[in-house]
Amino acid sequence: MIKNNFRIEQKSKMYLKLKYQYKRDFLVFQEIKKILNLYKNCKNILIYIPLKYEINLYKFRHFLTKKYQIFVPFMQDKSLKVVKLRLALDKKSFGVYEPKDSFLQVRIDIAIIPVIGVDAKLGRIGHGQGFYDRFFESISYKKPLVVFTQMIDAKSDQFFSQDYDIKGNFYINPYKKYFRKVKNNDRNISCINSRFHRRRDWIYSRQKD
């Protein structure tokens, strides 16, 4: 109940922030570029086709495609698969736009995912359908670096995400930036963790003991 009430409250706040959205989009995109520049092994990036109250990174796709392969989610049954971003887009369930299906097998290096909010350990609060959770559970390779985006600062001080909920390495909104240091054998991720731990403009989200 606490989680659902939090979701409803934050979603209503996002609808009030639709003015001057381009500036918020740009601020978040600038921070994402800094992370990408540090993650040297990144080749394949998962972004999303935004709903009107979500940060719009799709408008910056031409900058991203100069260096990376860009993929987006494709709803399949009760989970997701990743497909290459290409035109034209079709409107599907929940008002989400998607490209045509494809049958590529790809390893995602960084996943940029919208949220309704996050809890104290950067656990994702989404729409409650569980699409991303089931997708991440199905990944058989090393899990990608996870960056959450949102147009408002909706980080709770409470711990109410479940073990199966995706945890973000970063949570970026136009007002504050958070990171969660995790143990990882990837030297690039370790470098990113240490780099942001020293920066005062990033907030370290501590784990629950």
Image (cartoon, rainbow, N blue to C red):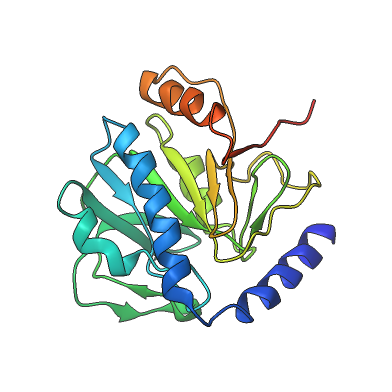
Question: Quick one: quadrant of the N terminus?
Answer: bottom right
Residue at image location 53% in from the left, 42% down from the top: 170
Location of residue 118 in the rendering, given as x and y in whole percent from the top left corner? 66, 52
The relative height of residue 206 versus residue 74 in the rendered view (above or below) is above
Q: Is residue 47 visible?
A: yes
Question: Among all residues in the image, which is located at the extreme front?
Answer: 200
Left or right: where 75 falls relative to 63: right
The relative height of residue 187 versus residue 148 in the rendered view (above or below) is above
- Depth check, front residue: 198 or 204: 198
Residue 145 lies in quadrant: top left
Q: What is the total number of numbered labels drawn onto the structure image?
A: 0
- Depth check, front residue: 194 or 98: 194
Q: Is residue 51 visible?
A: no
Left or right: where 132 falls relative to 38: right
- Depth check, front residue: 118 or 30: 30
Residue at image location 54% in from the left, 26% down from the top: 198
Location of residue 192 in the rendering, given as x and y in whole percent from the top left corner? 43, 28
- Depth check, front residue: 7 or 155: 155
Location of residue 113 in the rendering, given as x and y in whole percent from the top left corner? 47, 55
Question: Among all residues in the image, which is located at the extreme right?
Answer: 1
Question: Quick one: quadrant of the C terminus?
Answer: top right
